[in-house]
Amino acid sequence: MLIAGNWKMFKGVGEAGEFCRALREADLGTVDVVVCPPYVSLAAAVQALSMTEIGVAAQNVHWADDGAFTGEISAPMLRELGVYGTIVGHSERRQFFGETDDTVVKRILAAMEHGLHVIACVGETASEREAGDTESVIRRQVGAIAEGVADTDDLVIAYEPVWAIGTGKTATPEIAQEAHALVKSILDVPVLYGGSVKPDNAAELAAQPDVDGALVGGASLDVKSFATICREASHS
Ligand code: PEP
């Protein structure tokens, strides 16, 4: 069971260090734990969490090792910082920054080539769900990854229905289970659920047979709520 905290564009160096120092003292149960700070705070997090089992991952990575790609960060740069992995294809990247199934695969391949673990995000929007397209969207997004990535040892998929991200509208455990089973039927890797995971719904989501953990946004920004989610998920 893996619980990953996606901080999005929150917590600069000072706050990240403070958070990680508190996290190392917290009771996190028995789950594997990863935090994903913004790029500028990665080094502070790696340093504050050194000699612990808590991993530090980035929120994105470019596919080239270096080059004229203003504003981008490469896998070797992340490795040099001691970063363990990266999120790829988050819906906010797909929605606001032109991420496509194609670029998601390129980023996964580059990350893995340099030994980074990857959490690749998939999930349907509200209008896709309302139109009855959930299955075809998941098949398309996961299918692209299955086709493009041969070695999936260090790959985890996060099923994140876009309508549940930051909205407080969590998928029911049944909806999550159904989507996770579909993902696994296409690509046999661990699947995290993401979308308004909170201390009071973490246990029932984690109890589903095909839910292997959670990608937590808003509730990962507070040490107490993040630690409670970790402990709740540890029970299942
Ligand atoms: C996310 O950003 O991946 C996420 C799931 O956010 P939230 O938990 O806030 O819905």
Image (tube, grey):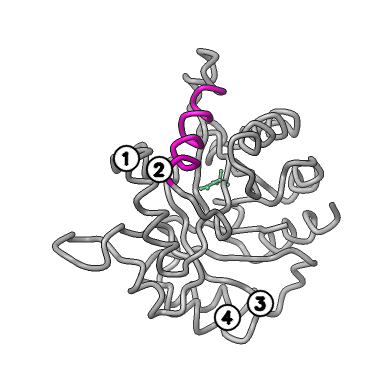
Report the magenta residues as a range. Answer: 135-148
Contact (CB < 8 A) between labels 1 and 2?
A: yes
Q: Of the residues shown, which amino acid type is indicated by label 2? A: Glu
Residue at disc 2, CB closer than 8 Å to ligand 1: yes
Name the residue that disc number 1 marks.
Answer: 96
Residue 2: image location, x then y, percent = 67, 58
Name the residue that disc number 2 marks.
Answer: 92
The alpha-carbon separation of the residues under discs 3 and 4 comes to: 8 Å
Q: Of the residues shown, which amino acid type is indicated by label 1? A: Phe
- The mark tally for this picture is 4
Above or below residue 162? Residue 50 is below
Q: Of the residues shown, which amino acid type is indicated by label 3? A: Glu
Residue 72: image location, x then y, percent = 26, 61
Judged by depth in the image, the label closer to the viewer, 3 or 2, is: 3
Question: In the picture provided, is 19 more to the left or to the right than 89?
Answer: right
Q: Of the residues shown, which amino acid type is indicated by label 4? A: Leu
